[in-house]
Image (cartoon, grey):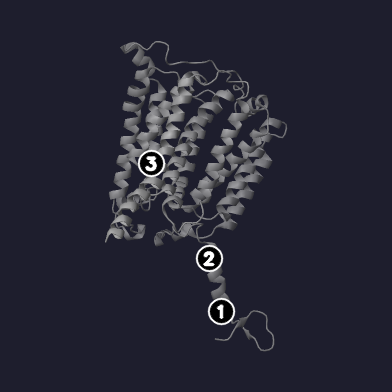
């Protein structure tokens, strides 16, 4: 076939209008593809209105909002103006990200929602980078920008003063954080989607609390608080309910009917509510003993989950933010939203040999957790002067040695020993 050229010149064929439209449509389809080819999903044709580009409408709404704020905000209040300005800055970034970012692994309730979640993760990471370059004193003053009552040293609270198994002590241990434990593990079950890994991390976190109790007093708990109230009651309840949800979504038949195809009002409302449920469900089969890459990915994923758990305790202790403060709750809620698509992208990169790069959600979340860790390392200087107990150092050294020894046996020595008898039998024949 003759070679086509866009610019007319002697001996070259000029593209027709139809051919140019076809090339433009192909280019638009390529730009609209998600970052990973594994995440192709179909949309409901009866809801196409919500999937058409609305960039000009969004721009008009954004400018109208700025106009309202500019005319009605009191210009004499500098602190209020600063907060409005920062809020507007974040809003612009989120809107631009929703318009320009690529789709992630999820499409429900709408791909734009998850693009906004990624934008919030980027904003949080940028705030952490700014906080990293401040002093500890300045970091605590920054917290007063969000709440003037912050910036005051927190009283130390220990849960292990009286460990007698009495109804009075058990009732004193049943505070709001019992519900937080269950809700937290319910969320982690939806993220991890694996019974075994949930229980490994549940036990590992209690061991981490034992190991770090000399630094954070609220980690000092009674044995029955660790293993009965936390692990066997709260964590079990959260993991059980969360995995039941996972089993429901796994066994559910996903047959999506358009709203206009449903005759009854009740059916239409049910379909509208189903828009906030998964479009499909992927079961995570980690299989860490299959090959060394799977084992290393399994361990890394567990370390990242533990890091996300421990960072919040150190940050609120170093920045003097009470555990019940809305900032702590907001951080946990945002991290849950960040982790849902990140875990899906991590599992795709972990299990699919055809996936050559990590998704944007996962990459940004890992950077966020590591930045939080750097802030903790910097601000912790001079705070925790007591050295680690010898038993803690020996225990975690044995755990590291066990992991290294298992990987050496499973992926190096055992396959070689299996090959040796087969070679001998071939030589004997």
Locate residue 398: give its quadrant.
top left
Badge 3 or badge 2: first in the primary sequence: 2
Badge 3 is on which residue? 190
Depth-wise, is mark 3 or mark 1 nearer the camera? 3
State the quadrant of the N terminus: bottom right
Residue 5 place in picture, x, y as percent: 63, 81
- Which residue, as the protein is rendered here, is positioned at the far right? 76
Badge 1 or badge 2: first in the primary sequence: 1
Q: CA distance from mark 3 to mark 2?
A: 32 Å
Q: Residues within 10 Å of mark 2 (few under 14, many from 20)?
A: few
State the quadrant of the C terminus: bottom left
State the mark number for residue 292: none
Q: Is residue 367 left or right of residue 244?
A: right
State the mark number for residue 19: 1
Badge 3 or badge 1: first in the primary sequence: 1
Front in this rendered view, residue 10 or 176: 10
Badge 2 is on which residue? 30
Locate residue 374: give its quadrant.
top right
Q: Residue at x 58, y 44 (%)?
A: 122
Q: Is residue 139 left or right of residue 289?
A: right
As helix, strand or loop, the secondary structure at mark 3 comes to: helix
Residue 149 place in picture, x, y as percent: 59, 21
Q: How many marks?
A: 3
As helix, strand or loop, the secondary structure at mark 1 comes to: helix
């Amino acid at each position: 076939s003759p070679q086509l050229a866009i610019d007319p010149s002697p001996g070259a064929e000029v593209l027709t209008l139809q051919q140019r439209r076809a090339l433009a449509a192909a280019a638009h389809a390529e730009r609209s593809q998600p970052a990973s080819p594994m995440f192709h999903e179909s949309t409901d044709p009866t809801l196409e209105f919500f999937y058409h580009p609305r960039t000009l409408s969004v721009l008009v709404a954004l400018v109208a909002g700025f106009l309202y704020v500019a005319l009605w905000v009191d210009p004499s209040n500098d602190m209020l103006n600063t907060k409005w300005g920062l809020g507007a800055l974040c809003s612009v970034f989120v809107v631009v990200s929703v318009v320009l970012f690529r789709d992630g692994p999820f499409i429900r309730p709408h791909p734009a929602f998850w693009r906004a979640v990624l934008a919030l993760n980027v904003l949080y990471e940028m705030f952490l980078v700014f906080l990293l370059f401040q002093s500890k004193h300045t970091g605590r003053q920054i917290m007063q920008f969000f709440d003037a009552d912050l910036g005051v040293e927190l009283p130390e609270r220990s849960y292990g003063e009286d460990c007698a198994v009495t109804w009075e002590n058990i009732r004193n241990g049943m505070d709001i954080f019992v519900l937080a434990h269950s809700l937290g593990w319910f969320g982690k079950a939806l993220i991890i989607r694996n019974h075994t890994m949930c229980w490994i991390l549940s036990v590992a976190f209690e061991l981490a609390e034992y190991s770090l109790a000399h630094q954070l007093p609220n980690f000092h708990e009674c044995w029955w608080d660790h293993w009965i109230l936390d692990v066997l009651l709260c964590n079990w309840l959260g993991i059980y309910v969360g995995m039941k949800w996972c089993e429901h979504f796994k066994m559910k038949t996903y047959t999506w009917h358009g709203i206009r195809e449903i005759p009854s009002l009740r059916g239409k409302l049910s379909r509208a509510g189903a828009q906030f449920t998964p479009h499909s469900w992927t079961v995570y089969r980690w299989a860490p003993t299959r090959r060394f890459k799977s084992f290393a990915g399994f361990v890394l994923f567990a370390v990242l989950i533990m890091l996300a758990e421990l960072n919040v305790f150190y940050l609120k202790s170093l920045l003097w933010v009470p555990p019940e403060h809305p900032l702590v709750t907001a951080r946990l809620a945002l991290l849950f939203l960040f982790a849902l698509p990140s875990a899906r992208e991590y599992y795709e990169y972990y299990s699919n040999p055809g996936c050559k790069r990590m998704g944007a959600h996962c990459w940004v979340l890992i950077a966020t957790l590591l930045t939080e860790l750097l802030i903790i390392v910097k601000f912790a200087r001079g705070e925790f002067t007591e050295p680690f107990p010898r038993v803690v150092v020996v225990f975690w050294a044995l755990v590291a040695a066990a992991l290294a020894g298992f990987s050496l046996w499973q992926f190096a020595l055992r396959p070689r020993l299996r090959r040796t008898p087969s070679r001998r039998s071939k030589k004997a024949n």
